[in-house]
């Protein structure tokens, strides 16, 4: 069919309104499609936000549960001096006061430089800011009675800052001391121990581990 | 069946036929005169939009058989078109029908050229139709429809002549060879009710035969099968009129059954069997038609317009439905988004409030947990100073003559404590060390028996008894005497002195005690 064979007036008749309707419907379709896409996008964004805030909130609840569970114990460790910087002065002072208070005939100590420790427990969720330290301590005590050893270390445990870990100890009676002296050295004790402390992010890093 | 209109063109008129559910009805007849044309134009003005079909049933329609060599489709078409134009150059209403290979004629192909030789019979009507923009489905020829029509009624014989009474007093004869149209005639007859109708019928058949023989479409010896649509009474009259039945076989087709087979609803008029052709044309689009040359084909434009309207309407409805669905879905999503937004806001507010309450705790909760777990770990792996002394002291009270001179203990770690990991040079950075778990506790006990009278057997027994008590009554699981007052082994050398004044050497001993830590609670 050639173009000349077309009678455009004839073709136009009755086709105008359906064509206009189709065009209007197309415009409406495009508009509703745009609206739909926009709403879908918004919905996706809000859904992601919701998931994210839910995750944050769950994390907060978990942290709160951790705090509820560990807070008291943490405070105990903090008051013991385990959480916090190691204080050599406190240690030496505590040894001196305990020895003089117990009238121990002789006490000598040798504290090594502090070492960094691989934290023995792991946490995959956080706590990377924590650092554990230890200082090795060699101690020689002149005792009147072996009970003095128990009392001395008991006093160190309660008064000296940090946790104390005794790995080795030897007691030997002074030779020729068949008759115990009332105030002299009857028993000599040699002990190896560790002083342990942890530094968390709420401890001032400038002085931590000094 | 749809309501259709036929413009049935005869030699001197145009008859409007309408096909409805009730039947084929012959309507207004317009004569081929100025008055008739004006009337037809007035008639069309009222129903110009109605689609129509032109069916031509005129005397001045010519059929010429031709042969062409075997050719490809394109060449064949152009050859047929050229020959057709040469044969019927003065009429646009012409058609060349390729009929294929004929049995007896070797490689040649048969072609039938047909044309309405007097185009004036159609042109005035068509001009009026086109001027009213009435869609015309096609211009069909009655003889060309005969081929398909006869096949509906009977299987045509080799040489068949199909006869039907048309327009009251005209006899349409269509000659078919092997079921293919080869020639046709329209002749005048007396009234079918008259006495001479039978003989006139026979005369017309004889004329047709002579024409066919003259044009070599039929030989004198060929049997001609004549198929006549006629009622029984007319059939008798026709048979009575046939004088010589040699080389002729007459078959009558009952008009009622023919009407049903052709698809004519209702009864047929006995003198107007052209209705059969019209019904045939209406029920199935005929194979052959004359083209409307140099005229706008409004039927095609009407189809195009309908297609545009249908497409646009479908698109409008479809798009509207899809738009509605998308809009509903969008509104639903908008609703859901608002709900989520409100939930998020609420959650954010709760989070902020909780977080503000949580803020005063400085240490990170995970650090807090880790510090506490580390502290607990150290406490679990710490041996209290009093433990060894209490364990041994609880047994020694029952062995009054066994005196301890020295006691030492140490813990065995599962891992290297890192004591050798200290920096070797002053500027070396020290590597982190481990805090080991307690694997075992070893204790060494040195002592002597006092008083001791020199009785070695008694001394050995007392030492063994002490070792046994330590093993059974303390947490130590392995207690071994490592030193006796003398070394009793045969391979060892032993030296001593017996003093008659009763002085004896002290009976010294050593015991090693071990406990392995199975679990974490040391």
Image (cartoon, rainbow, N blue to C red):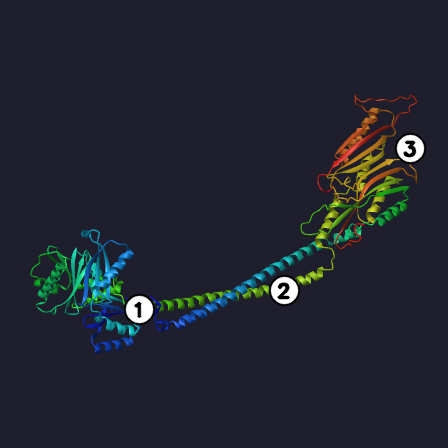
Assign the N terminus of chain A to one quadrant of the image.
bottom left
* Of marks 1 and 3, the one in the foreground: 1
Residue B493: quadrant of the picture: top right
Q: Residue at x 87, y 48 (%)?
A: A93
- With respect to residue B449, does B270 lie above or below? below
Q: Chain of mark 3?
A: A
Q: Secondary structure at mark 1?
A: loop
* Residue nearer the viewer, B227 or A134: B227
Q: Residue at x 70, y 62 (%)?
A: B356
**Contact between labelled residues 3 and 1, with CB atoms less than 8 Å apart:** no
Q: Circle 3 sits on which residue? A: A176
Q: Circle 2 sits on which residue? A: B346
- Give the distance between the C-alpha atoms of the residues marked 2 and 1, in whole angstroms: 71 Å
* Of marks 2 and 3, the one in the foreground: 2
Q: Is residue B201 left or right of residue A100?
A: left
Q: Circle 1 sits on which residue? A: B297
Please tell me if label 1 and label 3 are on a single chain. Answer: no
- Give the distance between the C-alpha atoms of the residues marked 1 and 3, in whole angstroms: 142 Å
Q: Position of residue B19 (x, y in %)?
A: 25, 69
Q: Residues within 10 Å of mark 1 (few under 14, many from 20)?
A: many
Q: Position of residue B446 (x, y in %)?
A: 83, 32
């Amino acid at each position: 069919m050639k173009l000349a064979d077309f009678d455009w007036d004839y073709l136009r008749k009755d086709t105008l309104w359906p064509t206009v309707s189709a065009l209007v419907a197309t415009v409406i379709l495009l508009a509703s499609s745009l609206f739909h896409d926009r709403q879908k996008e918004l919905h996706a964004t809000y859904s992601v936000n919701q998931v994210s805030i839910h995750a944050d909130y769950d994390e907060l609840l978990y942290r709160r549960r951790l705090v509820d569970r560990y807070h008291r114990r943490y405070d105990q460790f903090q008051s013991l001096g385990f959480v916090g910087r190691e204080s050599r002065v406190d240690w030496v002072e505590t040894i001196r006061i305990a020895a003089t208070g117990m009238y121990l005939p002789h006490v000598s100590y040798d504290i090594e430089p502090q070492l960094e420790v691989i934290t023995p427990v792991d946490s995959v969720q956080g706590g990377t800011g924590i650092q554990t330290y230890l200082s090795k301590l060699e101690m020689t005590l002149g005792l009147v009675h072996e009970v003095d050893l128990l009392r001395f270390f008991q006093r160190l445990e309660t008064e000296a800052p940090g946790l104390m870990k005794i790995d080795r100890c030897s007691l030997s009676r002074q030779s020729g001391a068949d008759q115990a002296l009332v105030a002299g050295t009857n028993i000599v004790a040699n002990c190896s121990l560790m002083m342990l402390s942890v530094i968390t992010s709420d401890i001032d890093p400038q002085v931590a581990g000094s | 069946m749809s309501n259709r209109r036929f413009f049935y063109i005869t030699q001197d008129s145009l008859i409007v036929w309408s096909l409805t559910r009730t039947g084929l009805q012959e309507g207004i007849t317009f004569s081929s005169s100025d008055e008739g044309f004006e009337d037809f134009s007035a008639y069309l003005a009222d129903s110009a939009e109605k689609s129509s079909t032109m069916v031509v049933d005129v005397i001045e329609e010519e059929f010429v058989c031709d042969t062409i060599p075997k050719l490809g489709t394109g060449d064949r078409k152009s050859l047929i078109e050229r020959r057709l134009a040469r044969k019927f150059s003065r009429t646009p209403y012409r058609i060349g029908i390729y009929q294929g290979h004929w049995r007896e004629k070797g490689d040649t192909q048969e072609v039938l050229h047909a044309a309405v030789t007097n185009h004036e019979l159609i042109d005035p009507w068509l001009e009026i139709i086109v001027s009213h923009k009435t869609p015309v489905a096609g211009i069909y020829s009655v003889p060309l429809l005969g081929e398909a029509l006869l096949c509906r009624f009977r299987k045509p014989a080799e040489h068949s002549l199909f006869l039907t009474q048309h327009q009251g007093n005209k006899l349409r004869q269509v000659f078919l060879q092997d079921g293919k149209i080869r020639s046709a005639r329209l002749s005048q007859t007396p009234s079918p009710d008259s006495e001479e109708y039978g003989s006139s019928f026979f005369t017309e058949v004889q004329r047709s035969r002579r024409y066919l023989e003259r044009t070599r479409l039929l030989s004198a010896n060929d049997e001609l099968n004549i198929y006549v649509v006629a009622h029984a009474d007319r059939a008798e009259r026709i048979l009575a009129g046939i004088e010589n039945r040699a080389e002729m076989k007459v078959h009558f087709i009952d008009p009622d059954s023919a009407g049903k087979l052709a698809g004519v609803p209702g009864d047929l008029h006995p003198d107007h069997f052209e209705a059969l052709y019209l019904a045939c044309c209406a029920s199935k689009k005929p194979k052959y038609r004359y083209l409307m040359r140099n005229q706008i084909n409004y039927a095609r434009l009407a189809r195009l317009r309908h297609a545009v309207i249908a497409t646009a309407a479908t698109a409008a409805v479809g798009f509207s439905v899809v738009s509605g669905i998308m809009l509903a879905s969008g509104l639903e999503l908008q609703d859901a988004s608002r709900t989520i937004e409100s939930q998020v806001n609420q959650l954010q507010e709760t989070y902020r409030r909780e977080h503000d309450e949580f803020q005063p705790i400085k240490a990170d909760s995970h650090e807090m947990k880790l510090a506490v777990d580390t502290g607990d770990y150290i406490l679990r792996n710490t041996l209290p100073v009093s433990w060894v002394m209490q364990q041994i002291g609880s047994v020694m009270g029952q062995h009054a003559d066994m005196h301890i001179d020295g006691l030492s203990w140490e813990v065995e770690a599962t891992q290297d404590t890192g004591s050798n990991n200290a920096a070797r040079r002053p500027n070396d950075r020290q590597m982190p060390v481990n805090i080991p778990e307690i694997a075992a506790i070893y204790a060494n006990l040195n002592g002597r028996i006092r008083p001791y009278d020199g009785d070695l057997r008694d001394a050995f027994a007392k030492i063994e008894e002490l070792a046994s008590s330590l093993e059974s009554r303390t947490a130590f699981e392995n207690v071994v005497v490592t030193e006796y007052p003398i070394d009793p082994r045969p391979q060892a050398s032993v030296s001593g002195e017996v003093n008659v004044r009763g002085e004896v050497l002290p009976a010294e001993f050593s015991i090693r005690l071990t406990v392995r830590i199975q679990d974490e609670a040391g």
